[in-house]
Amino acid sequence: MDPLALTLIELGAVVFCLGLLARLAGRIGMSPIPLYLVGGLAFGAGGIVELEGMKEFAHLSGEIGVILLLLMLGLEYTAAELFTGLRKSWQAGVLDLVLNFIPGAGLALLLGWGPVGAMVMGGVTYISSSGIAAKVITDLGRIGNRETPVVLSILVFEDLAMAVYLPILTATLAGVSFLGGLTTVAISLAVVTVVLMVALRHGHRVSQAVHSENSEVFLLNLLGLALLVAGIASALQVSAAVGAFMLGIAISGATAHSATRILEPLRDLFAALFFVAFGLNTDPSSIPPVLGWALVLAVITAATKMLTGIWAAKRAGIARPGRFRAGAALIARGEFSIVIAGLAVASGAVPDELAALATAYVLLMAIIGPLAARYVEPVLKAFVRPVRVPAQA
Amino acid sequence: MNVDETDLPGLGRRKDFMTASGRRIGVVELREGQTELIVSTWDDPDTCQASIPLTGDEAATLGNLLGGQHLAMKLAEEHREIPGIVTRQFSIAPGSPFQDQPMGKACIRTRCGVSIVAIMREGEVLPSPGPDVVLHPGDLLIAVGTQEGLDTAADILRNG
């Protein structure tokens, strides 16, 4: 068959299947991410059918998917929100980092994957899925809850931490020397600081530069600029994703809202392809051997996120049920864990088992997270007698 | 009254307060411009029993109902000394004959001796409105008059 025709047929079939999977996920009320990953596993090396023709396209789409994921993450927050978030919740943020980085890093060392593997797995277990968390909070009608700002500010802190972590990871994976690594980190920290300052003072100018009433012009401006910034950041070894994230932060106000609206369908498509591309490169037969470890890691890091949430909510003066709700909302891991694992796998600096473990882990956490958030309260009520005396009217 | 304002990064802003009965009540203003009315459960003020999405019109109407009730109660209190005087609220429904018309066109005072002492609009009070004030759907008129006069006024406002 003509290779182009083959690629189109494969791509069409995959995207169509993803649509079916997303619909199934919506029907049973779960995040589509685990299903996308399973889809990728099924179509990749060692899967049910191996799709060779679309591999190249899937790879590039995956890269674009990461850029769009991070760009939209940046669009969600204004620089001012990031600063207040940082000021108000850095203690909780640091506790979150310590408690949730260590289990992943420790297991990687235990399995003999070295410091690079530890760096990667620490990141995978650290970062909660802000996409899943936000959806859970909205779906369960918890936007007005008192613990919600606590959860959101921890997520904000994590996203800022990502902006520092990703460049360090990129440098580590590229195997640059210690001195070279320090330079990269220094450059990235300087860039992050400068962008935040610029965004805070002159965000409206950046917004003006990309904004257009014509949605076509706006989309092309925005996408072009995002890819350019990501490419330049990548050339400076600061990580393409962070470049896109910073651009997202610099764009603010009404422009950010319309940008979110306009990019959403593109993000959905390319992010789905990103999860598939990640799954494509993982051999499903490599998963069962690491499933046990993934389970252990899942249990430990569910508990550590729970502790983080409980501690942070308690500090904010929230009663017991709210503390548990805050902890459970943070449990889900998803897109960003896969972004980190994907960077590591693409660099070839980590063993293949790491990809398998990360896949299995995210599969578990993306399913457990929303379930935990939904059922933590009924479970808590069944086991603990209510302490609070209802207020008198 | 102490209203707490809390930022919800990425989502919007929450404004709420504690009622005397121990429930937290307020609104969440979402980024995309929607408003949600939130009411906490009775046993856990941290959580929400209901979060009800409201359109702009609905939020304004609810604000008028609550504010109007308060105003009407105050007026009734002041008129208690004068027998025969009653305070009542009339809302301008969409499709009312006086929608988008100056209030003077209804000639309420001339026809039934009823005074419109205030209009509640989008949570704001317009005190002593003149005949030139244009009525909008969702407006709440606070009227003072006799029982019969108010009945007539209600009929005028509904049917022209």
Image (tube, coloured by chain):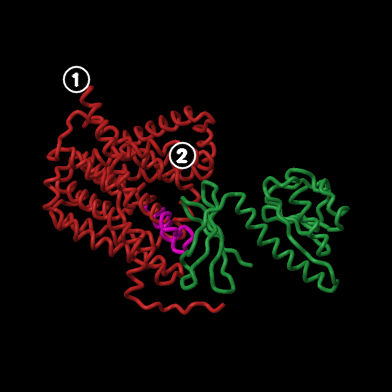
Chain colours: A red, B green
Q: For residue B113: magenta?
A: no
Which quarter shows the N terminus of chain A?
top left
Please give left or right for residue A84 compared with residue A369 in the image: right
| Closer mark to the observer between disc 2 and disc 1 | 1
Range shown magenta: A138-158
- Residue A310: percent from left, percent from top: 37, 67
Q: Chain of mark 1?
A: A
- Within 10 Å of disc 2 (Cα), the crowding (few <14, some 14-19, many 20+) is few
Q: Chain of mark 2?
A: A
Please give left or right for residue A387 compared with residue B117 in the image: left
Checking the image for residue A261, the label placed there is 2
**Residue flagged by tag 2: what amino acid is it?**
Arg
The residue under the point 35% across, 61% down is: A374
Seen from the viewer's position, the closer of residues A222 and B97 is: B97
The residue under the point 38% across, 46% down is: A189
Real-space Cα separation, disc 2 to disc 1, in angstroms: 37 Å
- Residue A92: percent from left, percent from top: 39, 62
Numbered marks: total: 2
**Residue flagged by tag 1: what amino acid is it?**
Asp
Looking at the rendered structure, whether the residues under marks 2 and 1 are on a common chain is answered as yes
- Residue A7: percent from left, percent from top: 22, 26
Could you tell me which secondary element the residue under label 1 belongs to?
A: loop
- Residue at the spot of label 1: A2
- Residue A224: percent from left, percent from top: 41, 29
Classified by dominant secondary structure, the portion drawn in magenta counts as helix
Marked residue nearer the N-terminal end (2 or 1): 1
- Within 10 Å of disc 1 (Cα), the crowding (few <14, some 14-19, many 20+) is few
Which quarter shows the C terminus of chain A?
bottom right
Could you tell me which secondary element the residue under label 2 belongs to?
A: helix
Seen from the viewer's position, the closer of residues A198 and A152 is: A152
